[in-house]
Image (cartoon, rainbow, N blue to C red):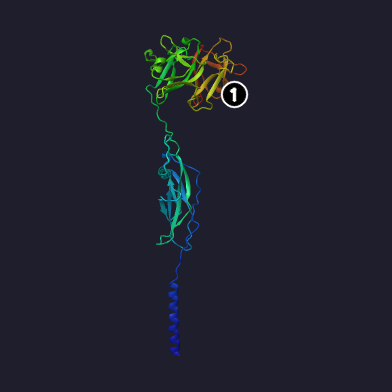
């Protein structure tokens, strides 16, 4: 009986050992995930500048992949300038759930893709690059899993850093009968600033006095120096194309003569392309409106008529200025008003408009105390530079 029990114990031991061997031979096979995808939202366009190269461009995020069994998963973010990733580059790797790229990283990709921000280049400034995510468990022979490719549209805005204008002179001057605000006097010459490389331009009040010698003027490189003059033949002989409203005055100095319609023009002398042109007056700053208009009895070239209003152009940020003829009728109407829209009487700005806003107003301009509380000019009749500065809140006459 003891032998039988002993034999039974031996057999039970073999069964137990065999069972343990079978349990030790079990293997767990990881299944490749099918849910690998980016979870962050993408912009419709990524604007890239060198000034923001250190800033965050995009943060790629995703959820942990499920391989069906606990395992360590590694992720790689890849980039490419081709949608087929034939030239895939490693951006970064992690066992976490996010990788960030900077604007500088995207700029490098943009360069590889042939993009640039040079307006003179044939290369585009907008294009696409692609990103994808790779997941793996690091086991030799294990299947690598990729997310769908994500396209990013990159845009390189044109280089807007201003190029400093260079000219032979900082400005050119002009005086003569054809320039209403100057005449043959150096007190108030017309000034044409260097506004581009080899380019001088400025707004000027040109008048046609009928006869050529009543409409003439000349350019000068040095104020008050008559010997620095540049007359019509100076430019014509150098091969300049000159606006047809400017002709040779055929006077003793062969000055220019203006034969067009009296008014305010933008005059441009381009020494590179060798042209002298007349165009519409140009604003040169940022203002609420480009032009303020003035009409009234105190403005003799305008009167209370919209045919020939005085125009004050935006000449700086929040600044309007222009040369105007002002008259003092000795107790009669000297009044006028400013307007933001030509022909629109409802857009008027009278004396209280500025006084109530805290402006310091030139003492030669007072409240006319008429029905509309217009301005009234009480100074000496003549031509003045009138400036309205909405930043410092002053109205001046010079």
Residue at position x 47%, y 46% in the image: 152
Most extreme residue toward the right is: 371
Coordinates of residue 300 in the picture (x, y in percent): 55, 13
Can you tell which quarter of the image residue 371 is in?
A: top right
Q: How many labels does the image show?
A: 1
User: Could you say which is closer to the camera, residue 83 or residue 285?
Assistant: 83
Q: Quadrant of the N terminus?
A: bottom left
User: Could you say which is closer to the camera, residue 211 or residue 200?
Assistant: 211
Coordinates of residue 136 in the picture (x, y in percent): 43, 58
From where the camera sits, is residue 18 visible? yes
Can you identify the residue that label 1 sits on? 347
Q: Is residue 137 above or below residue 246?
A: below
From where the camera sits, is residue 362 visible? no
Can you tell which quarter of the image residue 110 is in?
A: top left
**Pointer 1 local density, CA inside 10 Å: few below 14, some 14–19, many at least 20:** few
Coordinates of residue 390 in the picture (x, y in percent): 51, 25
Q: In this view, does 96 lie above or below 249?
A: below
Look at the numbered disc 1 and give the secondary structure of its residue: helix
User: Could you say which is closer to the camera, residue 258 or residue 366?
Assistant: 258
Q: In this view, does 289 lie above or below 118?
A: above
Coordinates of residue 12 in the picture (x, y in percent): 45, 82
């Amino acid at each position: 009986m003891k032998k039988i029990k002993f034999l039974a114990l031996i057999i039970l031991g073999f069964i137990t050992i065999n069972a343990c061997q079978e349990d030790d031979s079990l293997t767990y096979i990881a299944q490749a995930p099918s849910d690998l995808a980016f979870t962050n939202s993408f912009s419709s366009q990524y604007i890239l500048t060198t000034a923001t190269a250190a800033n965050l461009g995009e943060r790629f995020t995703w959820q942990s992949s499920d391989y069906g069994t606990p395992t360590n998963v590694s992720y790689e973010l890849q980039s490419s300038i081709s949608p087929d990733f034939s030239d895939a580059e490693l951006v970064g790797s992690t066992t976490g759930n996010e990788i960030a790229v900077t604007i500088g990283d995207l700029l490098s990709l943009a360069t590889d893709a042939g993009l640039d921000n040079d307006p003179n280049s044939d290369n585009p400034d907008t294009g696409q690059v692609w990103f994808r995510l790779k997941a793996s468990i690091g086991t030799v022979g294990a299947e690598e899993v990729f997310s769908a490719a994500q396209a990013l549209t990159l845009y390189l805005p044109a280089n807007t850093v201003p190029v400093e204008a260079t000219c032979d002179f900082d400005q050119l001057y002009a005086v003569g009968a054809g320039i209403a605000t100057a005449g043959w006097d150096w007190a108030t010459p017309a000034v044409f600033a260097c506004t581009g490389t080899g380019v001088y331009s400025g707004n000027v009040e040109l008048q046609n006095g009928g006869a050529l010698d009543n409409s003439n003027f000349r350019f000068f490189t040095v104020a008050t120096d008559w010997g620095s003059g540049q007359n019509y033949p100076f430019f014509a002989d150098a091969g300049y194309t000159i606006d047809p409203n400017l002709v040779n005055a055929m006077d003793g100095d062969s000055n220019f003569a203006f034969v067009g319609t009296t008014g305010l023009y933008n005059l441009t002398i381009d020494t590179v392309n060798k042209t002298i042109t007349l165009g519409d007056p140009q604003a040169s700053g940022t203002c609420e409106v480009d032009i303020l208009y003035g009409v009234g009895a105190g403005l003799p070239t305008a009167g209370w008529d919209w045919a020939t209003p005085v125009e004050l152009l935006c000449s700086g940020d929040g600044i309007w200025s222009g040369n105007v003829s002002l008259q003092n009728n000795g107790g009669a109407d000297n009044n006028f008003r400013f307007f933001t829209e030509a022909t629109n009487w409802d857009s008027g700005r009278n004396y209280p408009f500025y006084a109530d806003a805290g402006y310091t107003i030139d003492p030669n301009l007072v409240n006319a105390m008429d029905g509309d509380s217009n301005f009234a000019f009480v100074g000496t009749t003549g031509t003045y530079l009138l400036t309205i500065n909405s930043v410092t809140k002053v109205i001046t006459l010079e």
